[in-house]
Amino acid sequence: MTIKLYDSDAYLSEFEATVREVTEKNGHYEILLDRTAFFPEEGGQSADTGTLGDVSVIGGRISDGEIFHLTDAPLAVGAKVTGRVNFAERYDKMKQHTAEHILSGLFFSHFGYHNIGFHLGAEETTMDFDGVPTREELDRIETLANEAVMQNLRVTAEYPPTEVLESLNYRSKLALTENVRIVTIEGVDVCACCAPHVAHTGEIGCIKILDAEKYKGGIRLHMKAGLRALADYRMRYRTTAALSALLSEKQTDLVPATEKLLADTAALTRTYRELKLGLMKKEGEDIPPTDKNLVRVFSDASYDELRAFANAAMEKVGGMTVALAPAKEGYSYLIAVREGDLSGNVREINAALAGKGGGRGNMVMGTFRAGIETIRRYFEEENA
């Protein structure tokens, strides 16, 4: 069984060890040491990274008490190596994980909510609870969590003897009677946990709940702590400051100002659409009469606008009225006839012009991938 150096010293970033086994796996190597400071992927937290000698450690897993280090090159069995943990990454995870314990402990002690899911990601931490707190309750817990940070409370990790463990009231209690690692945050939380934590809550800096969403009958929280929270605040402040300048509004007035802007924009959009439909109808009414097919290409038009044109134009067109507008790939089309049924023609038209679409009666619509000259030739010459 691998000796877990991080159990007794979460701040240890350099250590000496002996290589016990080396196994090739999917183009990488799994290195088994006699002792390690590398925390493996476990308990919702990703593995530490770093180096073993000159070899990069890119991951790790634990199985039956043995910790396997995933590397990009092999090491010799029996070799003595110096391990170096990427401590900046480790220390950030320690802050996030301890912050999660603070929040989970407070939710449990104040509302009886259990933490039923946890993931410490590269960008943020998510926590799942079996209850749904109100916005006010979330704010209250967030305030209490940051007060716990400011109090710089002691954080300890230990393996209590069986007789103590049996009488201990702690979160994540399993049917185990020995070798249970208990992480205690003074006055805030007692929980079984395998991961490294900070020694004092003040090291976290700050804790921020970013978002909350209903999840499996409870709630999922998104959280950042420490420098992650600072970076998030900096980004949000700069964003709101930029919006404030663009809208010439105070940051505290951005929501009502944006709501007014959206309402004004929606009203203008409706007016524009009505005017555009009217113009398209007028353009259709103004075309000279013809017994042949009519092809009209617009620089920008929706299907509703193409329909407005075609409905008016087909009264003067003896053949097909073909209204086109550029699409993501090729052209949007709407084809109409004054009398008759196009549903039998549309398959042939699509086959000739790399199109797809359809319809019933005297109007069909879809898209053509053929070029505009090919489309014009098909309707104006080959099938005029």
Image (cartoon, rainbow, N blue to C red):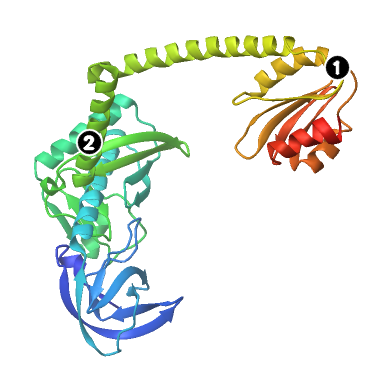
Q: Is residue 381 visible?
A: yes
Residue 245, position as x, y percentages in the image: 24, 22
Q: Is residue 346 above or below residue 85?
A: above
The disc at residue 233 is 2
Circles 2 and 1, Cβ within 8 Å, touching? The answer is no
* Residue 38 position by quadrant: bottom left
Residue 357, position as x, y percentages in the image: 75, 35
Residue underneath mark 1: 338
Q: Pick whichever of labels 2 and 1 is earlier in the sequence.
A: 2
Q: Is residue 298 above or below residue 177?
A: above
Specify the quadrant that holds the N terminus: bottom left
Select label 2 or label 1 by which is in front: 1
* Residue 277 position by quadrant: top right
Q: Name the foreground residue: 24 vs 159.
A: 24
Name which residue lies at 25% across and 81% down: 34
Q: Is residue 105 visible?
A: no
Q: Name the foreground residue: 291 vs 182.
A: 291
78 horizontally vs 331: left or right: left
Specify the quadrant that holds the C terminus: top right
Name the kind of residue labelled 2 in the image: Tyr
Q: Name the foreground residue: 193 vs 223.
A: 223
Q: Is residue 213 above or below residue 124?
A: above
Name the kind of residue labelled 1 in the image: Arg
Residue 96, position as x, y percentages in the image: 24, 49
Q: Is residue 155 above or below residue 370?
A: below
Local secondary structure at mark 2:
helix
Residue 279, position as x, y percentages in the image: 63, 11
Q: Name the foreground residue: 1 vs 150.
A: 150
* Residue 371 position by quadrant: top right
